[in-house]
Image (cartoon, rainbow, N blue to C red):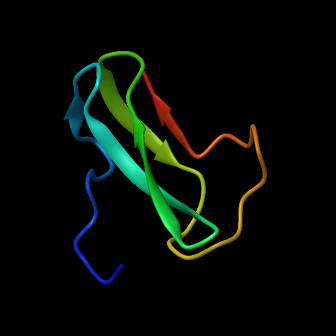
C-alpha cells in the first residue's frame, strides 16, 4: 500500500512475475502472471474492491 505499482500499462511481463497485490482479511496476496506478454489493460483502480474471479488486468 502506498508503494509504486508492480507493473504499468505496456510493460512486458514474464510467467510468475508479480502483477499486483490483493488484500483479503488484512493479508496481502500476490497475483502473478500466468503467461508472458504485454500488459494491455488494467481493469481496476488501486484500492477498489473486487470480486472473486473478476478480471483485473489483461496480458496479451
30 on left or right of 12: right
Q: Residue at x 73, y 43 (%)?
A: 54
Asked if 54 appears above or below 6 in the picture, the reply is above
Asked if 23 appears above or below 32 in the picture, the reply is below
Q: Position of residue 30 (x, y in %)?
A: 40, 47
Q: Position of residue 20 (x, y in %)?
A: 39, 52
Residue sticking out furthest to the bottom: 2
Q: Residue at x 22, y 71 (%)?
A: 4
Asked if 53 appears above or below 2 in the picture, the reply is above
49 on left or right of 22: right
The number of numbered discs placed on residues in the rendered structure image is 0
Q: Residue at x 59, y 46 (%)?
A: 56
Q: Position of residue 7 (x, y in %)?
A: 27, 50
Quadrant holding the N terminus: bottom left
21 on left or right of 51: left
Q: Residue at x 31, y 21 (%)?
A: 37
Q: Position of residue 8 (x, y in %)?
A: 28, 53
Quadrant holding the C terminus: top left
Between 45 and 53, the residue placed more toward the observer is 53
Amino acid at each position: 500500500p502506498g508503494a509504486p505499482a508492480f507493473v504499468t500499462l505496456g510493460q512486458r511481463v514474464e510467467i510468475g512475475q508479480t502483477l499486483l497485490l490483493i488484500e483479503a482479511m488484512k493479508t496481502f496476496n500476490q497475483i502473478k502472471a500466468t503467461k508472458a506478454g504485454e500488459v494491455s489493460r488494467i481493469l481496476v483502480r488501486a484500492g477498489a474492491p473486487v470480486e472473486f474471479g473478476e478480471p483485473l488486468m489483461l496480458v496479451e
